[in-house]
Image: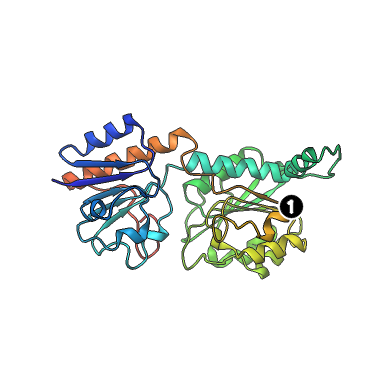
Amino acid sequence: MNNVLAVGPFKEEQKKRLEEAGKGCSFRFCADFNGAGVSPEEIASADVIIGNLTPSRINESPRLKLMQLTSAGADAYVKPGVLAKGTVLCNSTGAYNKTVSQHAFAVTLAMQKKLYLYRDNQNEKLWRDEGEVGSIADSTVLVMGLGEIGIAYAKMCKALGAYVIGVKRRPSACPEGIDEVYTMDALDEVLPRADIVFSILPGTGATYHIYTAERFKLMKKSAIFVNCGRGDAVDNKVLYDALNSGEIAAASIDVAEGEPLTADSPLWGLKNLFITPHVAGFFHIPDTLEIITDIACHNLKAFLSGGSYRNIVDFSTGYKA
C-alpha cells in the first residue's frame, strides 16, 4: 500500500477528492502549511507528499516517489540533499494566476495614484494633496517573467491601454497581451523604457540579485517597481538606496530578502515603499486551493496508473519543464 502525506489547509471535500484519486492508498492529512505536526516516521514512510513540507525534513527520503508542491515556486526543493534521485517533483503552476496577478495590478494602481501616501495622511489626519499621479493607460509596463502570472498581469495592464514589454528566459513569439518580448540578455536595454517594472521571477542562480544598483540607475526616476516573485531578486540595501536616493519613484514588495522582514529594517521607514507580508499568493482566494487539489488529484492518478504528470519541475532550472 502506498502512503500519502498531505500537508496544508485542505477542506473536507478536497480531502475526499484526494482520497478518491488515490484510492487504495493510506492517507495522513496535516493542516499545518509546512507540516510542523508531522513526525519523522510519517515523512520517512511516505510514498507521496502533497504540500510544502519543510525541505530539510525530507532528507532525500529513499521511499518518496512523488513530491507534489502546493506552491508554484520549487527552488527550495531542487537543491541537493532534499529529494532523492528519481523522485518526481511537480509544482502548482496555474493555481496562482488570479490571486497574484490581481494583487500586483492592485498595488500598481495604488502606487501610481499615490494611495499609499493618502493612507499615511489619513492615519495622521492630514487633508493634503500629494500632487501629480500616473496613468496606466499612458504607461510602458515591463513584465519580468512571462509565466502564467506574468501574462495574466500583462493582460490587465493592456486592457487599460498600457504598452507591455515582456522579458523571459527563452526566445518566443509575443504571447497574447504582450507588445514586445525579449530574453534576459536584453534587460539593460529595456529597463530605461519602463514606467512600471513588475517582477515575478522565480528564485534561481540566474535571478539572484538581478536588480543591481546599476540597474535601478537605468530606470526612469519616475518608475515604479513591483516585486511579487522572489525577495532575493534584489538586495534589501540596494532597494533601500534606490528609493531613498530617488533613483526610482516608488516600489511595492510582497517579498523581501529574508522573511519575515525584521523590525529594524530601514525599509519600513520609506514613505515611497508599500510592503505586504508575502500574501499575494497563498490560499487567500478559495479558488487557489481548488486548482491545487485538481492538479494533485491528476498527479495522484498518474502516479498510480503510470500516466503523464502535470507540472513536472526541471531540477536543472527550478521551472516547470
Q: Residue furthest top?
A: 13
Is 123 placed left or right of 11 in the picture?
A: right
Find residue 4 and report its horizontal and vertical position in percent. 23, 45
**Residue 320 falls in which quadrant of the image?**
bottom left
Q: Residue at x 21, y 61 (%)?
A: 62
Q: Residue at x 72, y 45 (%)?
A: 112
Q: Which residue is mark 1?
A: 272
Q: Work out whether residue 62 or residue 193 is closer to the camera in this orientation and state it.
A: 62
Q: Is residue 19 above or below residue 37?
A: above
Q: Locate the N terminus and report the quarter of the image it occupies.
A: top left
Q: Residue at x 26, y 53 (%)?
A: 43
Find residue 140 and report its horizontal and vertical position in percent. 67, 50
Is 281 placed left or right of 86 in the picture?
A: right
Find residue 138 and report its horizontal and vertical position in percent. 72, 45
Find residue 183 and report its horizontal and vertical position in percent. 52, 62
Q: Residues within 10 Å of mark 1 (few under 14, many from 20)?
A: many
What amino acid is at disc 1?
A: Asn
Q: Work out whether residue 173 or residue 148 is closer to the camera in this orientation and state it.
A: 148
